[in-house]
Image (spheres, helix red, strand yellow):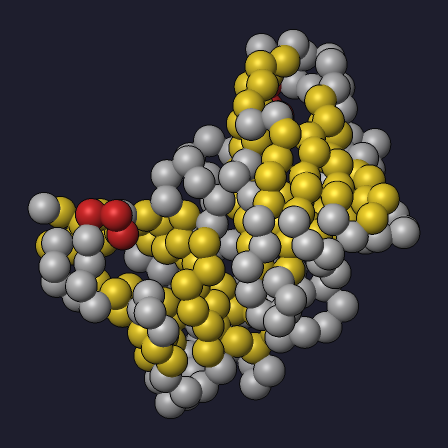
Amino acid sequence: DAKTTQPPSMDCAEGRAANLPCNHSTISGNEYVYWYRQIHSQGPQYIIHGLKNNETNEMASLIITEDRKSSTLILPHATLRDTAVYYCIVRSYGGATNKLIFGTGTLLAVQP
Amino acid sequence: SAVISQKPSRDICQRGTSLTIQCQVDSQVTMMFWYRQQPGQSLTLIATANQGSEATYESGFVIDKFPISRPNLTFSTLTVSNMSPEDSSIYLCSVAGKNSYEQYFGPGTRLTVT
């Protein structure tokens, strides 16, 4: 699976959009981009995933560049409860193992 | 979504002893995984627990140190054997969701070895 690069930390004002970048320049054609987050002392939580089109759900939006070498997770109206470590993971879909390999992630601190 | 419970939620153990962590899921799942999260670090995959066969271990993890059982599609155990302080971590159970693209995580077991 391709590796990802994320900034170690970011700040965001409460109520504003949080834009979390991720670079995955070695992504291959059958690999998806997944986002998970881990709130302190809890297990990771699935947020969203995508292949090449932009995706949106009730939690966030995922914007993937046309060349698929980078993506941005957008939390449209960040709240204090969104303070967490956000992990961008590239993984091929299906197959025998379906395992997730975590990188170092981005610590998002939402400020009041 | 799958609801995952782990027992114990936390424990303090003496070096040289072993601890077995249980993972129970409220529905049958194909894939179960065990992760370790050392203090201040990201998650590291230990192994994939296979129902009816031996677990598949990641590089750096061995069966003698982390034996895993998976007797059915809703339950798995991870044993941390002959513990040392370096084994102090949070151990998390994870399962692959019904649609395969989503993976759910348990609340974790916080282990401290003294």
Q: Position of residue B104 (x, y in %)?
A: 56, 54
Task: Answer left or right for A88 relative to B72.
Answer: left
The image quarter containing residue A36 is bottom left
Q: Nearer the viewer, residue A107 or B28?
A: B28
Q: Residue at x 83, y 32 (%)?
A: B64
| The N terminus of chain A lies in quadrant | bottom right
Q: Position of residue B21 (x, y in %)?
A: 69, 30
* Numbered disc total: 0
Q: Is residue B78 visible?
A: yes
**Above or below for B111 versus A32:** above
Q: Residue at x 33, y 69 (%)?
A: A58
Q: Position of residue B77 (x, y in %)?
A: 75, 36
Q: Residue at x 68, y 41 (%)?
A: B24
Task: Answer left or right for A72 relative to B4.
Answer: left
**Above or below for B6 versus B27:** above
The image quarter containing residue B71 is top right
Q: Position of residue B72 (x, y in %)?
A: 83, 48
Q: Residue at x 84, y 52 (%)?
A: B51
**Above or below for A112 versus A2:** above
Task: Answer left or right for A33 relative to B5.
Answer: left
Q: Is residue B58 visible?
A: no
